[in-house]
Amino acid sequence: MEKNIPYKTYLEESEMPKQWYNVRADMKNKPAPLLNPGTHQPMTAEELSGVFCEELVKQELDNDTAYIDIPQEILDFYKMYRPSPLVRAYCLEKVLDTPAKIYYKFEGNNTSGSHKLNSAIAQAYYAKKQGLKGVTTETGAGQWGTALSMACAYLGLDCKVFMVKVSYEQKPFRREVMRTYGASVTPSPSETTEVGRKILAAHPGTTGSLGCAISEAVEVATHTEGYRYVLGSVLNQVLLHQSIIGLESKAAFDKLGVKPDIIIGCAGGGSNLGGLISPFMGQKLRGEADYRIIAVEPASCPSFTRGKYAYDFCDTGMVCPLAKMYTLGSGFIPSANHAGGLRYHGMSSTLSQLYDDKLMEAVSVEQTAVFEAAQKFARIEGILPAPESSHAIRVAIDEALKCKETGEEKTILFGLTGTGYFDMVAYQKFNDGEMTDYIPTDEELQKSFAGLPVID
Amino acid sequence: MEKNIPYKTYLEESEMPKQWYNVRADMKNKPAPLLNPGTHQPMTAEELSGVFCEELVKQELDNDTAYIDIPQEILDFYKMYRPSPLVRAYCLEKVLDTPAKIYYKFEGNNTSGSHKLNSAIAQAYYAKKQGLKGVTTETGAGQWGTALSMACAYLGLDCKVFMVKVSYEQKPFRREVMRTYGASVTPSPSETTEVGRKILAAHPGTTGSLGCAISEAVEVATHTEGYRYVLGSVLNQVLLHQSIIGLESKAAFDKLGVKPDIIIGCAGGGSNLGGLISPFMGQKLRGEADYRIIAVEPASCPSFTRGKYAYDFCDTGMVCPLAKMYTLGSGFIPSANHAGGLRYHGMSSTLSQLYDDKLMEAVSVEQTAVFEAAQKFARIEGILPAPESSHAIRVAIDEALKCKETGEEKTILFGLTGTGYFDMVAYQKFNDGEMTDYIPTDEELQKSFAGLPVID
């Protein structure tokens, strides 16, 4: 064990980043623009501002400004739960008996239980600043809804959450956390929206999906005076806010005099991965440094590894703009045995472009292997990880074991996005030996791809 | 807002305490010794070592050594989740509009969700060092059982937990966390022990109590080769290990150049309170400084404020040594509407003696007022507190509001012992307006006191 690297590195308050980093500014090939679903023309700021707050629209469309000041009020909120620690996984290294040096950036030490709070407070802040009364959103596993509820409670904004029905029923405690923070939580699809009623009529007994909950939240935002819609992943603005994860990680590494070789993050819509890798990818794009960057996704929802790079609907109701992304088709729903998040059919446009440009890799992993890694990690490192985060743990362990074979002393960084305290139903399945895997067949994916819109 | 005090103060790894502090060494009136339940003579080291590990027996009986070295293996484990932050509650101060300066020491940022891990790793370490196969214990709200499971998983020790039946049923997720860490969890009272069968025969349909689960765990430890019993609160050794909380707090305050005026902690068996106040009480005992120290207990289980200072059984089955303490009688069980922990009938002997010597105060609070404080704190400071910790929050807020009236700029420190992620059933009751209060009547207490043993 080297003596100079502590188990945990916290930046001082004065060392915390004061600007977000916008990786698009350094991309040669910019991410494709959002398209109007009717005209198939790029969405204008004016069109977008019916759905999103004005300042967030600016951030969404800004492909040029590399650094954007974080407003003081957001910096103050960040100080309540940030900086998050950069942890050296000494105990894991020892048990794996690997020459690799493993680090993780742990984002779970706040009540939302994940990194989602980083963007929630930013989006709620801009909504408040614009004089809005409230915001609407969707949530699946529940981290995003919890994070937004917390941000809104802090700022005194109303918060309406549409929660995927299967999660609403399986995770009553997540719902109660949101209610404790004053949010209203509606199971989706619901009878409260036109799109919800349509979906219920077409698919009676459906347990819902993220894409469907998005449609409902957007409908309520656009039909209610003083409300806008906010989204916890996928969008450029979200990756911008989440860059705080990577910026803090890089500042801590610089302080320690360490440079990672491999950077690993789980990927659903891309919020955590995009945030974690941003400043490192920036160096790579500018030719200043090289890193191996790996996106890890569930084998049951493999948008990077088996999806198509194409324009697609962001939601099931097809009311949102079209995004060019790696997608499984907006009708794709992961099989019922899939636990936790990372169940979105598409992927951030920015990450999709970077992946298409071969600036990063992607792998998919099956969930029993993921929970094996989760349990091992919990017992060795003392943190019970979220199922989502455990995808990154799985691949970090695999890469560390490769180093054991080759004898290479690589430095691995992975994003530990959150804790699994509200995922004990899934852990119980694993503990009881009842967890199963599922990989969609080629036929299933072809059927889903058939629903992709045709863009001239 | 003063500019020189950060929101959160973390000690550097090199600044972390390397010794525990034993407050008994500075007490003029030592806590009364444990008595053999048969002979009523002080328990000898030999007698105690049938139940507890040898090193822990030494610590239990040592009233003289002020500082005890923390073994390197425990220091290494502490580095995985410690130091815990000393947080300045700027946001709470602002909302309360108080001149008081509020600080809290937050022990919830580890998977056990509370401070219990500080003693669990110590007790598991000494058991391992003695060459034992495993340990047994009881758990109520579940923090202690989770903490011990984590420590045992880390060290490769077997862990058998008797969980109060009502908690076992109401908190299946707590149970699953323990199982994820490899512990076996048995609802208590159970048919697996003699004392359990006796209690079930006498009280069919009972939902259990901590005192009863202790009896079962002790029976299994003393009847199984290579096993010992460990306890998460009440004992002197536990307060010793928990002194890490107060030592870190004091070191952080010293670094900031701040001295608290009032120190507030919730009190069930006394593990958190005893640990938090230890070094401050030491200064007070040595005449070096003065502090107002307040124990906060539930009005439904008021051992300090309405109990008797007398020798009593530590457990329902009356198999454990007798302890002199503030007690409600070993047959006392809080009313069914009582949520969370802080439900033990007695109180640490050390704290009982300090309280009897008027070196600290105690107040009791009702649970709806506690959950009001919890919800307010969650919304303002972003941490969803455990019901237990919220007792301290309630009184910290009350004291801060008194400062607002008087204009005094007092510095308040309270112990935020843990998070409420597994207490959402109680939060749901509060959110739905269905939470109630209960204060035991004098008649109930008199009836319970009648069961106190008669000591010559």
Image (cartoon, coloured by chain):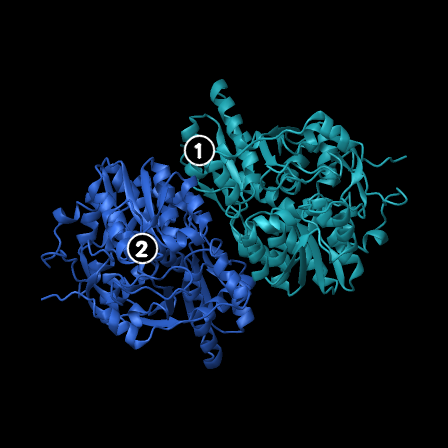
Chain colours: A blue, B cyan
The location of residue A193, given as percent across then percent down, is 26, 46
**Other-residue count near label 1 (Cα within 10 Å), few / some / many at <14 / 14–19 / ≥20:** many
Indicate the secondary structure of the residue bearing disc 2: helix
Left of B340 or right of it: where is A392? left
Residue B151: image quadrant is: bottom right
User: Which residue is drawn at the image coordinates 41% and 30% (left, top)?
Assistant: B94
Left of B333 or right of it: where is A409? left
Left of B370 or right of it: where is B43? right
Residue B323 tag number? none
Indicate the secondary structure of the residue bearing disc 1: helix
The location of residue A430, given as percent across then percent down, is 51, 65
Residue A104: image quadrant is: bottom left
The location of residue A28, given as percent across then percent down, is 17, 65
Q: Which residue is mark 1?
A: B92
Q: Which residue is mark 2?
A: A243
User: Which residue is drawn at the image coordinates 34% and 63% (left, top)?
Assistant: A267
**Other-residue count near label 2 (Cα within 10 Å), few / some / many at <14 / 14–19 / ≥20:** many
Q: On the rendered image, what quadrant is the N terminus of chain A found in? A: bottom right
Residue type at the position of mark 1: Leu
Q: Is residue B357 visible?
A: no
